[in-house]
Image (cartoon, grey):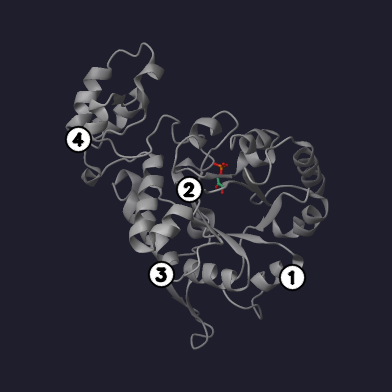
Amino acid sequence: GRTFFVGGNWKCNGTREEVKKIVSTLNAGEVPSQDVVEVVVSPPYVFLSLVKGLLRPEFHIAAQNCWVKKGGAFTGEVSAEMLVNLGIPWVILGHSERRLILNESNDACICPLIPYIFSFQFVGDKVVYALSQGLKVIACVGETLEQRESGSTMEVVAAQTKAIAERVSNWANVVLAYEPVWAIGTGKVATPAQAQEPNTERDCKEGIFVDLVEINYIEGQVACYVTQPIEKLGTLGSVQVYLDIGLSHLSLEKGGDMPSHVVHFELRKWLQANTSPEVAATTRIIYGGSVSGANCKELAAQPDVDGFLVGGASLKPEFIDIIKSAE
Ligand code: 13P
């Protein structure tokens, strides 16, 4: 079993007073036990010690980033060793905000100052170095809207995962976070009814039908995906129609749009093929992007969604509701 994982990424937010308030709300929250849900909050560096001193012990703490190698003359950076020294067990690496705004990439990067010492593949090397120092890593991947619309979602996400996977041998301390960039902070969460795995003719014949939400994806040229039993659709009238459309578009290879949870399913398949069946079966793949108290339960019900990385809502009391969606 994969223990449900809920991470709260506070990003670059908060004052000391606000941080204390968030922590006291978390401390007072009634949540499932640690064998049901693992909770990790990620304050900005400057508040790590404060939060560590106040937070209930069954909740853990992650830094939002760390330096790629051993510390030294790197002004402004914080090393993995320092986090370990402070007793911080987790670190988030490869977040899309760092990839896109701070230019962290999968590509090899040669340090212009001291090229003979530093040549690294940023995100992958960070993951490896942090793991080597004993940190646990929340490694983030995810496509932009442009990439999604051009049909390269899986290609992008697989390349990002590969950059990590080809350097990591022990996956026990890695959580993979799929965070589509278009869903972060936009309110455009993956619709709860979106699919877990590609539809098949067999599924349709056995009476699992696509949901009305999916009609956009279908019309937009792609696949139909199994979503939920027809009973749940109530009186929505056109089931038969889009089922038919769906059956003629069954291939994921056709490109175009792809519901987020299909990505979870595909990512696990990718792990199976490129790491090992055991890693694929045990690694938690969590979802991030506009997760809220209102949408978390249905998202959590998807078999390949093993938890969340929550941004905005992790600063609010509804984070407790999101933690509870593990049950
Ligand atoms: P939001 O939940 O605010 O969309 O942010 C998601 C995220 O980036 C978590 O790392």
Would residue 79 be seen by someone viewing this image from the given angle? Answer: no
Q: Is residue 197 left or right of residue 40?
A: left
- Residue 97 x, y percent position in the rendering: 53, 54
Local secondary structure at mark 3: loop
- Going from N to C along the chain, the mark reached first, 2 or 1, is 1
Mark toward the viewer: 2 or 4: 4
- Going from N to C along the chain, the mark reached first, 2 or 4, is 2
- Residue 85 x, y percent position in the rendering: 74, 70
- Going from N to C along the chain, the mark reached first, 2 or 3, is 3
- Residue 87 x, y percent position in the rendering: 74, 64
State the separation of the CA atoms marked 2 and 3. Answer: 20 Å
State the separation of the CA atoms marked 2 and 4. Answer: 26 Å
Which residue is label 1 attached to? 85
Give the image quarter of residue 240.
top left
Foreground pick, 158 / 68: 158
Q: What amino acid type is highlighted by mark number 4?
A: His
State the separation of the CA atoms marked 1 and 4. Answer: 54 Å
Disc 2 and disc 3 in contact, CB within 8 angstroms: no
Mark toward the viewer: 2 or 3: 3
Mark toward the viewer: 2 or 1: 1
- The total of numbered circles placed on residues is 4
Which residue is label 3 attached to? 166
